[in-house]
Amino acid sequence: MTTKVNMNGQARKSLAEQIDRLDAMLDGLADGLNDAVAAAVKDAVGMAVQQAVQAVMREMLTSPELLARLGAAVPAAAPAPEKTPKAKVSWKRCWLGVCKTLAVRLSALRLWCGRRLLGVRSQASGLLQQARMLGRFRNQLLVAAGIGMTVGAAAYLAGPWLSAAAGGIGGFAASLSVQLGLALRRLLAAVPAQ
């Protein structure tokens, strides 16, 4: 939209600007109205609750029947115990106290150790199950261990340079065989079954 110039040289606002201004004013009035209503309700409810509590308290404190019931419900104050002089504690009594404390501590220690032992048992059971699972691969593991020990012994006897060269060649061969196996597996998976 375009703006028009008044006779006195001031720019006249477009309709869109005036609508935006009116919208902003309405938003401000709505916010103010919400706050004013919330404050008025808060004040009115607070005053009503305060007056209700005061009226109930007034009725309670001026009701002879309620005061009589409350007076009957309050127990009589117990007399203060007389102070007696402290008796001497014998060594047998002290020893019994020490033994009792020691028995309680030993019982707590026994319970703590029992809990820890149960935890160790459960972990050992889990390890045993995993070891049984490895039993399925016993032959493969024995072959791998034998080959590894043979290669290690040969590398120890061969010297450092030959060992390094054999390790590099062995690593290359292992990596190459893994890659070839993966490629063969992909190739066989791509060939349809006949």
Image (spheres, rainbow, N blue to C red):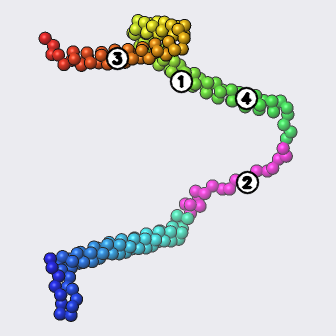
Distance from Cα at disc 3 to Cα at disc 2: 96 Å
Distance from Cα at disc 2 to Cα at disc 1: 55 Å
Type of amino acid under label 4: Leu
Choose top left, top right, bottom left or bottom right for residue 108: top right
Does residue 9 sit above or below 44 in this rendering? below
Crowd class of label 3 (few under 14; some 14 to 19; many from 20; radius 10 Å): few
- Label of residue 102 in the image: 4
- Label of residue 119 in the image: 1
Closer to the chain start, of discs 2 and 1, is 2
Which residue sits at x=24%, y=78%?
A: 21
Type of amino acid under label 1: Gly
In this view, the residue farthest toward the left is 194
Specify whether residue 162 is in view.
yes
Q: Nearer the viewer, mark 2 or mark 1?
A: 1
Which secondary structure lies at badge 2?
Answer: loop
Type of amino acid under label 3: Leu
Find the magenta span and give its range: 68-86
Which residue sits at x=29%, y=18%?
A: 182
